[in-house]
Image: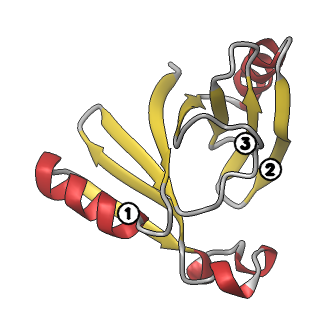
């Protein structure tokens, strides 16, 4: 079954913010720093110490975050929706449908943790669509 989670883009304070949310909500927090990730060579030196991905999980609640700059022009805010799909086929179908009339920000691609793409739908909502299936 698919699941939608909030994904927050912070301005270089993701670790501090997500630690605060953990103190408030509880749960398990995982932080991935750029220079400790398999993707480290894809990023310039000034981003190496920032949080590539944060995941705060407590039961069915998942809050996601990152320090990575949002490279979409005219973006209205720091929050996007992350659609986690069970399969790559489900991801491709959802990405195609959500993208109709919108704009693809990052096409679907496979990386070390799975398959992912980003888009802005025709209503201006930012989406990340992910599957752990490669």
Camera-side residue: 79 or 33? 79
Using residue 59 as the reference point, say whether residue 66 is left or right of it. Answer: right
Is 17 left, or right, of 48 in this rendering?
left
**Which residue does the numbered mark 1 point to in the structure image?**
30
**3 or 1: tag closer to the N-terminus:** 1
Say whether residue 26 is left or right of residue 45: left
In the rendering, which numbered label is found on residue 116? 3
Where residue 37 sits, quadrant-wise, is bottom right
Q: How many marks?
A: 3
Q: Is residue 27 above or below residue 48?
A: above
Depth check, mark 1 against mark 2: the one in front is 1
Residue for point 65% across, 37% down: 131
- Describe the element under mark 1 as helix, strand or loop: strand
48 lies above or below 112? below
Percent of width and height locating residue 99: 81, 19
Residue receiving disc 2:
110
Rendering coords of residue 128 (x, y %): 65, 36
Residue found at x 65% / y 30%? 127
Category of crowding for the residue at label 2, using alpha-carbon neighbours closer than 10 angstroms: few (below 14), some (14–19), many (at least 20): some
- Element under label 3? strand
């Amino acid at each position: 079954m698919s699941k939608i989670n909030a994904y927050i883009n912070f301005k270089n304070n993701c670790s501090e913010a997500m630690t605060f949310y953990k103190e408030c909500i509880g749960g398990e927090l995982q932080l991935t720093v750029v220079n400790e990730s398999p993707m480290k060579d894809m990023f310039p030196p000034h981003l190496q110490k920032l949080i590539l991905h944060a995941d705060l999980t407590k039961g069915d609640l998942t809050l996601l975050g990152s320090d990575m700059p949002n490279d979409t022009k005219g973006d209205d805010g720091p929050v996007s929706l992350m659609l986690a799909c069970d399969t790559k086929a489900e991801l491709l179908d959802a990405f195609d449908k959500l993208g109709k009339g919108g704009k693809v920000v990052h096409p679907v691609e496979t990386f070390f943790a799975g398959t992912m793409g980003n888009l802005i739908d025709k209503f201006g909502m930012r989406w990340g669509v992910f599957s752990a299936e490669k």
